[in-house]
Image (cartoon, grey):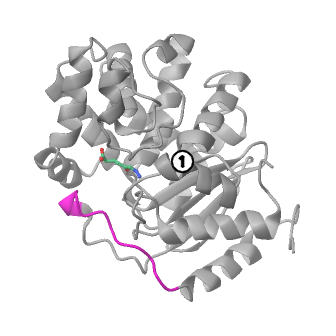
Amino acid sequence: MVIMTSSLTFEPVLERIAEEIEHTPGRGRPADYIPALAAGDPRRFGMAVAEVDGTVYGVGDWREPFSTQSVTKVFTLALDLAREGDELWAHVGREPSGNAFNSLVQLEYEDGIPRNPFINAGALVVTDRLLTRTGDAAGTLLDFLRTESGNGALDFDLEVAASETAHGDRNAALAHFMASYGNIHNPVPLLLDQYFKQCSVRASCADLALATAFLARHGVRADGSRLFTRSQAKQVNAVMLTCGTYDAAGDFAYRVGLPGKSGVGGGIVAVVPGRCTLCVWSPGLDDRGNSVAGVAALDRFTTLTGLSVF
Ligand code: DON
């Protein structure tokens, strides 16, 4: 049953989803390979919807800041694509990997070219290229998030970044390996510092739903200026749909039917092109690194509203 398609407010559907999630057992486990995230409480849940005009609705912990982690990969991809355009795709692919987000296995037989910009290897390539173009990839990202969300208080969480640096052997291995193929151009320690800062940004569901809205507006930023072309917005949304939730992207497309991007802090952003953006947060993850309650809530949202790309 579709309970709304174009009503004035998303609040009733958000309330209903929160109520259902509240009574759903089995919320997964917080990421513990980054010790600073291990204390996340799987009972926490927030959800926000931002309409393309900037109106934002929410339920639960929707104004609580959390660690954005891989959700930031959407923004660094968009910021780099806006600067270098299609040249990027010579250095990172756009196919689902079918492997874990931090896997090394494909890199050797695919000559140091990561499958897509959302697995860690691909995100490292994007951040490296954005760093070359801007001198400060993490700072460029933070400026963009502050401007698009309207929240100038957004910031890095240097404790989380330090925690990841201290346990960053896997990402360091990925970066050094790609450097050996000439696909990383900055010194690896500098790149890792930028990447871990990028991942550490704290933001709420409200902040992230608003910051993602340029993808629902086909590339147009909050101030009405254009970040990139309508076609590039379509490309980023398409890569989110096929690769944004890693080796669960097929199941996510099946259940939710929207472009989405997850992070191991428990956040997921999703886009209804031309209409609205969503962000959900709950720290309990499944074994692929996606928020259990977050995916369930997005599944319910598209089922109840009929708002999906299909
Ligand atoms: O590099 C990492 O492993 C983390 N900073 C980000 C991974 C992540 O969020 C994957 N998403 N589900």
List x then y, in percent, for residue 102.
32, 43
Along the line of sight, the residue nearer the viewer: 257 or 272 = 257
Along the line of sight, the residue nearer the viewer: 53 or 291 = 291
Q: Main secondary structure of the magenta part?
A: loop
**Badge 1 is on which residue?**
149
Q: Is residue 48 above or below residue 210?
A: below
Q: Taking the image as drawn, is residue 170 in sight? A: yes
Number of callouts: 1
Position of 77 with respect to 36 (left or right) is right
List x then y, in percent, for residue 78.
53, 29
Question: Residue type at mark 1?
Answer: Ser
* Residue furthest front as drawn: 109
- Quarter of the image with the N terminus is bottom right
Q: Secondary structure at mark 1?
A: helix
Asked if residue 95 is among those painted magenta in the image, a careful observer would answer: no
Identified at 55% across, 86% down, the residue is: 22
Along the line of sight, the residue nearer the viewer: 199 or 239 = 239
* Residue furthest left as drawn: 166
> Callout 1 environment at 10 Å: few (<14), some (14 to 19), or many (20+)?
many
Identified at 56% across, 13% down, the residue is: 86
List x then y, in percent, for residue 57.
66, 65
Magenta segment boundaries in residue numbering? 25-36
Q: Is residue 186 above or below residue 244?
A: above
Q: Is residue 263 above or below residue 187?
A: below
Identified at 39% across, 30% down, the residue is: 122
List x then y, in percent, for residue 41.
35, 76
Position of 27 with respect to 56 (left or right) is left
Choose top left, top right, bottom left or bottom right for residue 172: top left
Q: Taking the image as drawn, is residue 139 in sight? A: no
